[in-house]
Image (cartoon, rainbow, N blue to C red):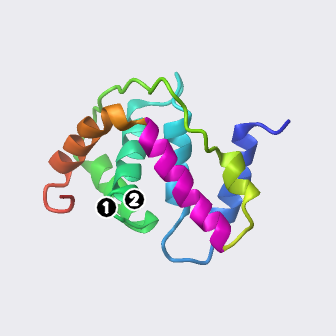
Amino acid sequence: MTSDQELYDELSVYTLTHPAPEFLHQHVVDAYTAQHPGNLTKPIGLVFALIGLYLFIEKGFTGRQVQKMHMRLANRRKQWPVIDPPQTKSKITVADVLAAAPGEQRDNAIRVWCAAVWETWSLQRSMVVKLAQEEFRHHVG
């Protein structure tokens, strides 16, 4: 059986070589990180992933725009809150995304996956939104 990490690596090859300027790879990184929090995930990684999902799903940011916001975050703060993971996991996984045909179907599957992962974090949504708004006063409403 193929591990989630191996499937993620395969999906990363797809998104890193994707010709679209939106940079889908950022959304894949954020969804995977948010879906696989653990002892090895640093607070900065999880916070960035959750803010990235929020900006993508709720604010319509492209992966490139999310990446720029992550760079701004990295320059603003050195300590990030520890966020407890949700009790439930998304029913949509990286395997489901890879099962979709490359192209429009897979690209859409990435969005659906991101939305499903973001939904599992709904109890922490207000904290993530508040943090994003504090950090990006003029860029996020």
Residue 76, placed above or below residue 23: above
Whether 31 is among the magenta residues is no
In the picture, residue 47 is in which quadrant? Answer: top left
**What percent of the width, then of the height, locates residue 86?**
44, 27
Taking the spot 39% from the left edge, 43% from the top edge, the residue there is 50
- The amino acid marked with disc number 1 is Lys
Q: Which residue is mark 2?
A: 56
Q: Do residues under tags 2 and 1 come within 8 Å of each other at their CB atoms?
A: yes
**What percent of the width, then of the height, locates residue 84?**
39, 23
**What percent of the width, then of the height, locates residue 123?**
33, 31
Whether 109 is among the magenta residues is yes
- The amino acid marked with disc number 2 is Phe
Kind of element beneath mark 2:
helix
Task: Quote the CA–CA distance across marks 2 and 1.
Answer: 6 Å
State the quadrant of the C terminus: bottom left
Q: Which residue is mark 1?
A: 59
User: Would residue 9 be seen by someone viewing this image from the given angle?
Assistant: yes
Q: Nearer the viewer, residue 42 or 83?
A: 83
Kind of element beneath mark 1:
loop
